[in-house]
Amino acid sequence: MSTDTDTDTSTESKCGASKSTDTGSSSTCGASSSDDEEEVGSTVDDFDADPGRLVAVGLGPGQPEGMTQRAQTALGEVEHIVGYTTYIDLIPDEITEDAEDIYSTPMCGEVS
């Protein structure tokens, strides 16, 4: 009888990130964790682009009709929309269709 067992402790999380008992592994949302800290610094002068503008928009209680006109206007004027897939899906199609790019990522346990 064989006593060999699989010692791989990695599992797949809800958001696709690796979970492991190894201390230098990825967190449940894919972020790397390590005791080694490295500081990286950069300024606007390090890039060949004009500085942009970041607009944070609250979507309201969850239904498109609950979104304020100000939020709709702000989202309609942006080139890129970034957020959790759950929230991106709440934005009316006429707004997301006008965006140049949409970046979304699944939640990693924020909603149960």
Image (cartoon, rainbow, N blue to C red):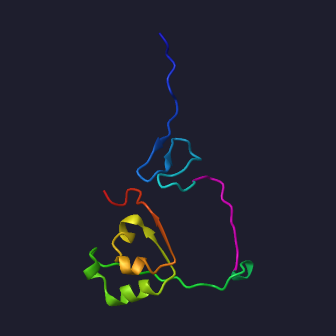
Q: Where is residue 107 shown, x and y percent of the image?
A: 40, 60
- Residue 28 in magenta stretch: no
Name the one closer to the observer, 9 or 82. Answer: 82
Q: Farthest residue toward the top? A: 1
Q: Is residue 53 above or below residue 105?
A: below
Residue at the spot 40% in from the left edge and 51% down from the top edge: 14
Q: Is residue 58 visible?
A: no
Residue 112 seen in this snapshot:
yes
- Depth check, front residue: 110 or 68: 68
Reply above or below: 9 against 23: above
Is 38 contained in the magenta span? yes
Number of on-image labels: 0
Left or right of 44? Residue 85 is: left
64 left or right, relative to 35 = left
Percent of width and height locating residue 45: 73, 82
Residue nearer the viewer, 65 or 32: 65
Q: Quadrant of the C terminus?
A: bottom left
Q: Residue at x 69, y 67 (%)?
A: 40
From what the image shows, is residue 22 above or below residue 69? above
Q: Quadrant of residue 41?
A: bottom right
Q: Main secondary structure of the magenta part?
A: loop
Q: Which residues are magenta?
A: 33-43
Residue 99, given in percent of the width and then of the height, sits at 47, 79
Tell me where residue 62 sits by quadrant: bottom left
The residue lying toward the viewer, choosing from 47 and 73, is 73
The quadrant in which residue 89 appears is bottom left
101 vs 95, left or right, is right
